[in-house]
Image (spheres, rainbow, N blue to C red):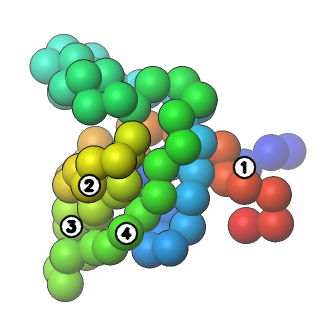
Amino acid sequence: MKKVYSLNDVQPGQKAVIKELRTDGSIHRRLLDIGLVKGTQVECVGKSPGGDPHAFLVRGAVIAIRSDDLRRILIQMPEGA
């Protein structure tokens, strides 16, 4: 059985590809607006000292996203990760 990963599983320095957004309402629209659409590659560039939020490089911009929202963004991890 294949494990389902969320963006919350990505550690600093790792890359992933967006598979699906399981969000709704205004947060869904905001994530789409910043470029988090299916097939987009993202890279985790850091976490705050408390672990929330995480910072991601998305289409050339660094975006901070809360852990609650990260859990609802499904990803594909690169081979060997």
Pointer 4 local density, CA inside 10 Å: few below 14, some 14–19, many at least 20: some
Q: Which mark is residue 3?
A: 1
Q: Position of residue 38 (x, y in %)?
A: 54, 25
Q: Earlier in the sequence, mark 1 or mark 3?
A: 1
Q: CA distance from mark 4 to mark 2?
A: 8 Å
Q: Position of residue 29 (x, y in %)?
A: 22, 18
In the figure, 19 relative to 76: above or below? above
Q: Earlier in the sequence, mark 4 or mark 1?
A: 1
Q: Earlier in the sequence, mark 4 or mark 2?
A: 4
Q: CA distance from mark 3 to mark 2?
A: 15 Å
User: Callout 3, which amino acid?
Assistant: Asp
Q: Which residue is mark 3?
A: 52
Q: Residue furthest bottom?
A: 49
Along the viewing direction, whichever of 43 and 29 lies nearer the viewer: 43
The image quadrant that residue 26 belongs to is: top left
- Where disc 2 sits, the SS reads strand
- Where disc 4 sits, the SS reads strand
Q: Earlier in the sequence, mark 2 or mark 1?
A: 1
Q: Which residue does the image show at 19% across and 26% down from the upper left?
A: 30
Q: Earlier in the sequence, mark 4 or mark 3?
A: 4
Q: Position of residue 8 (x, y in %)?
A: 42, 57
Along the viewing direction, whichever of 79 and 72 lies nearer the viewer: 79
Q: Earlier in the sequence, mark 3 or mark 2?
A: 3
How many badges with numbers are in the image?
4
Pointer 2 local density, CA inside 10 Å: few below 14, some 14–19, many at least 20: some
Q: Which residue is mark 4?
A: 45
User: Callout 2, which amino acid?
Assistant: Val
- Left or right: residue 80 compared with residue 32: right
- Where disc 1 sits, the SS reads loop
- Where disc 3 sits, the SS reads loop
